Image (cartoon, rainbow, N blue to C red):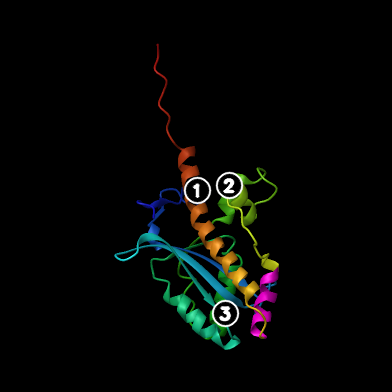
Amino acid sequence: MPRTALSLAFAKREGEQVRPHDLLFFDTETTGLAGGTGTRAFMIGAADWVRDGAGGEGLRVRQLLMTTMAAEPAMLETFAGWLADTTVLSSYNGRCYDAPLLKTRYRLARRGDPITPLDHVDLLFPTRRRYRGTWENCRLATIERQLLRIVREDDLPGSEAPAAWLNYLRGGSARNLRRVAEHNHQDVVTLALLFQRLVAAESEDHEILPMTELP
């Protein structure tokens, strides 16, 4: 767990900071990428830094999974319970996709929207500004491999996640659904690592080097 507040200068928010324990990194697995009222988030993953007397301190990962269609209201209510007025959300393209999708699902479930009032730091845009042209693209998997040196093994492509969930709902094997959960787990861990890397890179850019002594 970081010991001090983290600067948001990397997100073009000079002078702003966030306390580590206020950050909530989140990612959804959905029934499709088209969006709209027919698209659901069947899994929500979240990671936050916590400190407790029993387990010490570190990054906590929690995941919610809908095991029936009727479970969506309960999942939304539980996720809302993880949010506080001081929570700062962080995602990778979540401002354009995950957050709007969840807002729609809360509205359709006739529940209050807990997301709109919260601050949201989307890591996609500062990552693009810093690394565009360095590698072939700025997909999260590319950033993991090239910047964070994370190589996933037996990773299920996101495009196969909806089929894995639907197959499970129809009584099929849960093997691929477990792989979806592992993929989602790594996503939110990666977000926490990437956030810290962007903070450090921005700090290094503005580090004042000592002047060479004159002869």
Numbered tag placed on residue 105 in the rendering: 3
Residue at 51% over, 80% down: 75
Tag 3–tag 1 contact (CB < 8 Å): no
- Residue 174: horizontal and vertical position, in percent? 62, 77
Residue at 42% over, 20% down: 212
Q: Secondary structure at mark 3?
A: helix
Specify whether residue 168 is painted magenta: yes
Specify whether residue 44 is painted magenta: no
Disc 1 residue crowd, few under 14, some 14–19, many 20+, Cα 10 Å: some
Quadrant hosting residue 134: top right
Residue toward you, 104 or 139: 139
Q: Residue furthest bottom?
A: 70
Disc 3 residue crowd, few under 14, some 14–19, many 20+, Cα 10 Å: many
Numbered tag placed on residue 197 in the rendering: 1
Q: CA distance from mark 3 to mark 1?
A: 32 Å
Residue type marked 3: Arg
Instruction: Specify whether 144 is left or right of 209.
Output: right
Tag 3–tag 2 contact (CB < 8 Å): no
- Residue 33: horizontal and vertical position, in percent? 68, 70
Residue at 36% over, 60% down: 57
Residue toward you, 175 or 86: 175
Tag 2–tag 1 contact (CB < 8 Å): yes
Residue at 66% over, 85% down: 171
Chain-order first, disc 2 or disc 1: 2
Chain-order first, disc 3 or disc 1: 3
Residue type marked 2: Leu
Q: Secondary structure at mark 2?
A: helix
